[in-house]
Amino acid sequence: MDTGPVYREVQRFRQRWLWTLLGGIALLMLLLGPVSWLGLFIVGAVAAFVYSLRLETEVRTDGIYLKMWPLHWSARRISWSEIDKYEMRTYRPLREFGGWGIRWAPGKLAYNISGNQGIWIQRTNERSILIGSQRVEEFVTSIDEVYER
């Protein structure tokens, strides 16, 4: 019987620089000439989409679950049998992955929202995954408690 997650973290895009950038674009559109209602609508739609994005991470007895809502309707599971090794890691999101969100690079995949800390998971048969976390020590501790090598 599943008793729920041992660890759960929900992260959202709430960086001040991001909202300053989107607000600045909208303000420039209003100040620099005739208002493009379509342009303002697009900026507003992008802002609403980014505001709704959230990365949900859970450690359960049968694996690690990831869900980037609303892009994923159901969680992606990494079962313990797929994991070769894992470690806490500091990374450079722009240099290594080209930014934040769900990012692909040769042989690796990243789920990150903000910051530069996460868990690097080396999988047995597939590409490696980096999962960003704001509570990386707690994340690793929960994996250590549940993971069966």
Image: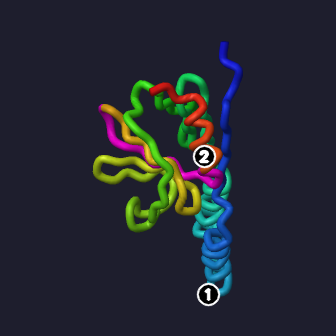
Please, is residue 1 above or below residue 92 in the view? above
Q: Which residue is mark 1?
A: 32
Point out the frontmost of discs 2 and 1.
2
Q: Left or right? Give the position of 10 relative to 84.
A: right
Chosen colour scheme: rainbow
Question: The residue tagged with tag 1: helix, strand or loop?
Answer: loop
Q: Which residue is mark 2?
A: 55
Residue 52: mark: none
| Badge 2 or badge 1: first in the primary sequence | 1
Quarter of the rendering occupied by the C terminus: top left
Quarter location, residue 21: bottom right
Q: Nearer the viewer, residue 33 or 46?
A: 46
Quarter location, residue 14: bottom right
Write the residue at 45% across / 65% down: 92
Q: Does the stretch in magenta take in 145?
A: no
**Looking at the picture, which amino acid does disc 2 mark?**
Leu
Q: Nearer the viewer, residue 122 or 19?
A: 122
Residue 126: % across, % down = 32, 35
Which residue occupies the extreme right position in the image?
3
Write the residue at 55% across / 38% down: 66
Tell me if residue 67 can be seen.
Answer: yes
Residue 148: % across, % down = 49, 25
Residue 130: % across, % down = 45, 48
Write the residue at 62% across / 41% down: 56
Write the residue at 54% across / 23% down: 62
Please, is residue 130 above or below residue 66 in the view? below
- Tell me which segment is drawn in magenta: 125-136
**Looking at the picture, which amino acid does disc 1 mark?**
Leu
